[in-house]
Image (cartoon, rainbow, N blue to C red):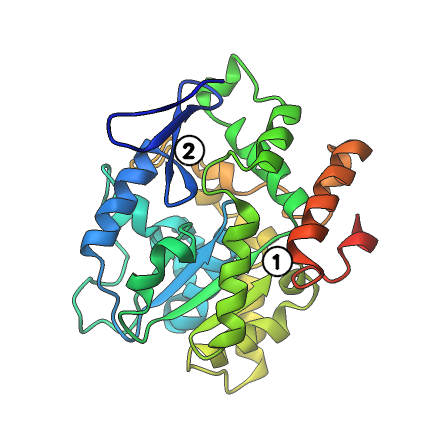
Amino acid sequence: MEIFQTGTSLLERKQFGDDFLYNFHGFWFTLLFLQGTQELLKQFKPLPNDVILASFPKTGTTWLKSLLYAIVNRSSIDELTRNHPHLLVPQLELQIYGPQAISPPLFPSLDPSSANRIFQTHLPYQILEETVNSSDCRVIYVVRNPKDTLVSVWHFVNSLELAKTAQWPLEEVVDQFCEGFLPFVPYYDHVLEYHKKSMERPKKFFFITYEELKSDPKTHVKKLAEFLGCPFDNEELVEEVVRSCSIETLRNHDVSKSSDVFSFYEFRYNSYFRKGQVGDHKSYLTNDMIDRIDTITREKFQGSIFKHEADSS
């Protein structure tokens, strides 16, 4: 693969398929996401009541979108049975400010008077810092075991049309992940900065692992509601949110099974719901791949994120 300097002074490098990645402030982006990111940084002014869900790709984003929507919009939780979570909680750099931006029909108005605005982003804090700190908006960050994350990324990309003629080799995904060359990587830098902010400013930044949420969803849903300033006043409503937003429930809605393609992106509705299991990487990664990733994870995280990572490998 060739690396060279482009006329825009962005580092450009070819990845799987026909796409190039561009290095922007130390992180890699496809052109579509880079354009949306640059527009976001120019235009987006978060309001004090805004909620921003941040994540690295394939770490539980769709599930968290559903949960946050249900927590904030409890009277319209049934919208999740008819609408894809990505149309209820839009991605800033893709759906709001991207080149193919749309106005989701059920998304709360961009009018400043709206108190139920929830956005999502894959942008690292290092790029979004000035924007999120310009108001009292709250940020929720979800992270997932890096091995399960990259296996999910691999499956996700291989659901694209271009992958029907040439599948993305898992060995290549692992190499690029470890070397720090995939969209939105470096993964470890992405995670660590949000974790650091959650320790420094816990009233503004909420940090949770996918594994924690899977192990005890009721407890963490209540914590999320408290963080957002809308605590539950009865246990039955907590159970309803957890049940309505479980991966199993969401996966079985007709809209989630649909093969329709999003108008703003080339992925199908049904490509966002696979297994959602913890430890799924064990069915795909070799021992050498696991050891390689674990070594980097221990070096980068030093036990601060996945405290029992060595035992869960």
Regarding residue 89, the answer to whether it shows in the image is: no
- Give the residue type at disc 1: Tyr
* SS under mark 2: loop
Q: Is residue 149 above or below residue 119?
A: above
Regarding residue 134, the answer to whether it shows in the image is: yes
The disc placed on residue 148 is none
Identity of the residue furthest to the top in this view: 165
Query: How far separated are the C-alphas under marks 1 and 2?
Result: 23 Å
Q: Tell me the mark number nearer the camera, choosing from 1 and 2.
A: 1
- The local crowd at label 2, few if under 14, some if 14 to 19, many if 20 or more residues have their Cα within 10 Å, is some
Instruction: Determine whether, in the image, residue 177 is placed left or right of residue 313.
Output: left
For the residue pair 55 and 231, the one nearer the viewer reads as 55
- Give the residue type at disc 2: Phe
Kindly identify which residue carries mark 2: 267
Q: Is residue 203 above or below residue 16?
A: below
Q: Are marks 1 and 2 in contact (CB under 8 Å)?
A: no
Instruction: Determine whether, in the image, residue 270 is placed left or right of residue 36.
Output: right
Kindly identify which residue carries mark 1: 210
Count of numbered circles on the image: 2
